Image (tube, rainbow, N blue to C red):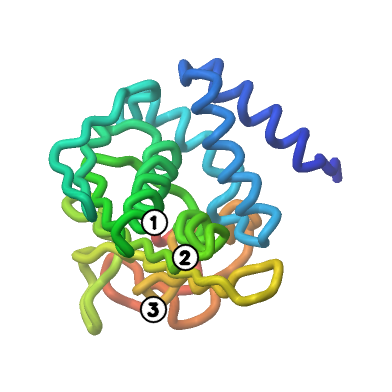
Amino acid sequence: MKYLTAAQLQEIGTRILDAAGSPHAESEAVCEVLVRANLLGHDSHGVMRIPQYVGQIRSGAIRPGTPIEIERETAAAAVIQAHQGWGMVIARKAMRLAIEKAREVAIGTVVVRGSQHVGRVGEYPTMAAEEGLIGMAFVNSYGTTGSVAPYGGAGRRLSPNPIAFAMPSGEPWPVMVDITTSVFPEGKVRVSQYAGKQLPEGVIVDADGNPTTDPAAFYG
């Protein structure tokens, strides 16, 4: 088995995204978030996502280099239109803007519309905690992204809609909670499929609503 350092993963991932048409600075920012997810033990949100992202760039689902647009703004809040740009890049900008507003008026709320996958959601409230603030991040995806069956159901109707929040702890690291509202994150299903492993019982159902431990059934 070949092992790579975090720096090597960062370089390789950045070069792949550059070759797919992403501006270099954005490629670097995306890979920083992915590699950090790997380092924290969340391979489900790490560099394994790169082939998926390349495919989405080619299909036009992700539009690297797209300028963001602030649609509405007040002293304490803003609405940003991402125009399907890199989720990680826009989410970082949104949290930085929220931090600036919180420093001025004690609270900052920024809503992002039209964003693509942001990666590990815990990345962003941690930015606020590192600045001595309490940070929260909520993802609300809808439409064709449904992957969660309602209790007792078989059809995909809901999004996992992850939630994360972080706060200073008085230690060199923050207190951080990063959860999904589903039983299991989709990315961890993908990790099991790539590794050729079965899932724990009670995690997914097949197309007929029957419990299964086969990760391939989720994508079938």
In 3D space, how far apart are the residues under numbered discs 2 and 3 (Cα atoms)? 42 Å
Q: Which mark is residue 133?
A: 2
Rendered image quadrant of residue 136: bottom left
Depth check, front residue: 57 or 7: 7
Q: Is residue 106 left or right of residue 155?
A: right
Looking at this view, name the residue that lies furthest to the front.
104
x and y percent of residue 96 in the render? 42, 46
x, y (%) of residue 164?
Answer: 43, 67
> Marks 2 and 1: in contact by CB < 8 Å?
yes
Q: Quadrant of the C terminus?
A: bottom left
Q: Secondary structure at mark 2?
A: loop
Q: Quadrant of residue 73?
A: top left
Q: Which residue is mark 1?
A: 103
Label 1: how many Cα within 10 Å (few below 14, some 14–19, many 20+): few
Quadrant holding the N terminus? top right
Q: Earlier in the sequence, mark 2 or mark 3?
A: 2
The secondary structure type at the circle numbered 1 is helix
Mark 2 residue crowding within 10 angstroms, few (<14) / some (14–19) / many (20+): some
Image x and y of residue 195, in percent: 65, 56
> Which residue type carries mark 1?
Arg
> Which mark is first along the chain, 2 or 1?
1
> What residue does disc 3 label?
211
Q: Is residue 185 above or below residue 56?
A: below
